[in-house]
Amino acid sequence: MKEMERTTPLQEMAGLDAGTPLFVQVAERLADEIADGGLAEGERVPSSNELSAFYRINPATAAKGINVLADDGLLEKRRGIGMFVADGARDRLLAQRRERFAERYVEPMVAEAVRLGIGPDEIVSLVHQSTHAQEGVTT
Amino acid sequence: MTPAISIDGLTRRYRGQSALDDVSFDVEAGSITGLLGRNGAGKTTLMRIIAGHEFPSAGAVRVLGASPAENDKVLRRIVFVREDQVYPTQLRVSDVLRVGPWFYPNWSAELAESLVEDFGLPPRRMMRKLSRGMRSAVGIVIGLAARAEVTMFDEPYAGLDAVARQIFYDRMLADYAEHPRTVLLSTHLIDEVAGLLERVVVIDRGRVALSAATDDLRGSVTSVSGAAIAVEEFTAGHTVWARRRMASQASAVMLSELGDSDLARAKALRLTLEPLTLQQVVVHAAGTPARDERDDADTRERTSA
């Protein structure tokens, strides 16, 4: 559903959109944070009540989002303390994203390029240009 | 697990007219459920029966395992905040809150006090001198501070502005997280509370039109728009709730989970897809103007969604 238009609720829910299951979005947000290093391995993950208050969603929905990642082994429970980012979680998430890179970004780009009559060589040169521009910004 | 509220074949007739007609659904203990529907659909009658203020013509209601009708043991565990609740006019705000613990065994004076402060209620003011919004706020304070096992709000915010409503939602969520209970909330402001609700029950003309987990509805109903031919092709074989057409353009509301291949196909057909919000889903579920056989078939499908 990610490629659909986002639907914004009237009530501000810290960026969650109203047209996708909320527990899925909570899980995605946490996974993003782990992949980006915002939540380090071994670090405590916000509790379902904290997520509930932040996103203004039902605590059971927040808990369901956490459980998606726990079932995947990306989070681990420490009794009486809470949920923590599992060792190796970041690498696993990054590997998953690399696997899906072609499907999510390259295939739609090529489809549009074909529609516009842009050939593979031109795509490659555009990719080079864009890479240089972005590296210029970051360094 | 025993449901907190169990409604089975409930019918309520007034002079031959059915206000509720064979209504059945369960409310799980420790959940927040939205009771939604148009004005006059039967939501208030249903809540009054659950609260033991009114009796069914047929069918059974069980609250916390027993019938609420004239059952003081059960009624003490229920709080029901009604739209435009009437309070004894000669009391002050502080008096109303002082009697809270007489009726509700789990009453939290501490929570009541902090809510009074959040809503900016003047404790010394007489109830009859309060504005409509302030009276609504008093109802909300009672409903939350009671910490009753079954907590029902029926359109509790007449006259409350958006800021006060946000306070209500935030404080309810925070206290609910610490002290779980069963909440039934009737409202028209569906988008405002959508994130709070685990389930919705939509009542339409006295019947259950939809009963589903909110996260199952999100993403399951999609508006498809674009060239009429493309919309036709894309929606073929799916349940369609509504269609609109203007010249060569069309839009349809389609009931279906869409996978990546569907998204790719929609893109190739140059269609715009937009998932419906909970409010839009409810409007479609409760808004069918006429009920013919096809509608009934659709309703069944929605009920089982």
Image: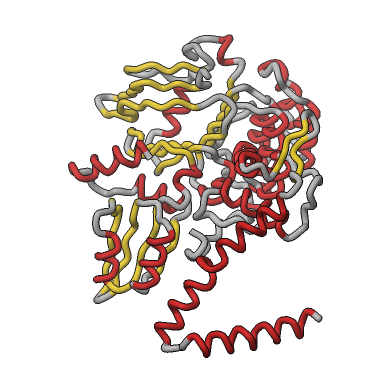
**Vertical placement of B180 versus A92: above or below?**
above
Relative depth, front residue between B273 and B6: B273
For the question of whether residue A65 can be seen, the reply is no
The C terminus of chain B is located in which quarter? top left
Q: Please give the name of the residue rendered at 46% of the width and 16% of the height, measured from the top-left corner.
A: B62
**Vertical placement of B299 versus B280: above or below?**
above
Q: Is residue B110 left or right of residue A19?
A: right
**Vertical placement of B167 versus B175: above or below?**
below
Rendered image quadrant of residue A70: top right
For the question of whether residue A39 can be seen, the reply is yes
Percent of width and height locating residue B266? 37, 67
Relative depth, front residue between A17 and A139: A139
Percent of width and height locating residue A78? 77, 33
Rendered image quadrant of residue B130: top right
Percent of width and height locating residue A68? 60, 42
Give the color scheme: rainbow, by chain, secondary structure or one colour: secondary structure
Q: Please give the name of the residue rendered at 55% of the width and 36% of the height, measured from the top-left corner.
A: B84
Q: How many labels does the image show?
A: 0
Q: Please give the name of the residue rendered at 64% of the width and 58% of the height, measured from the top-left corner.
A: A95
Percent of width and height locating residue B207? 33, 33
Rendered image quadrant of residue A62: top right
Q: Which residue lies furthest to the left in this view?
A: B293
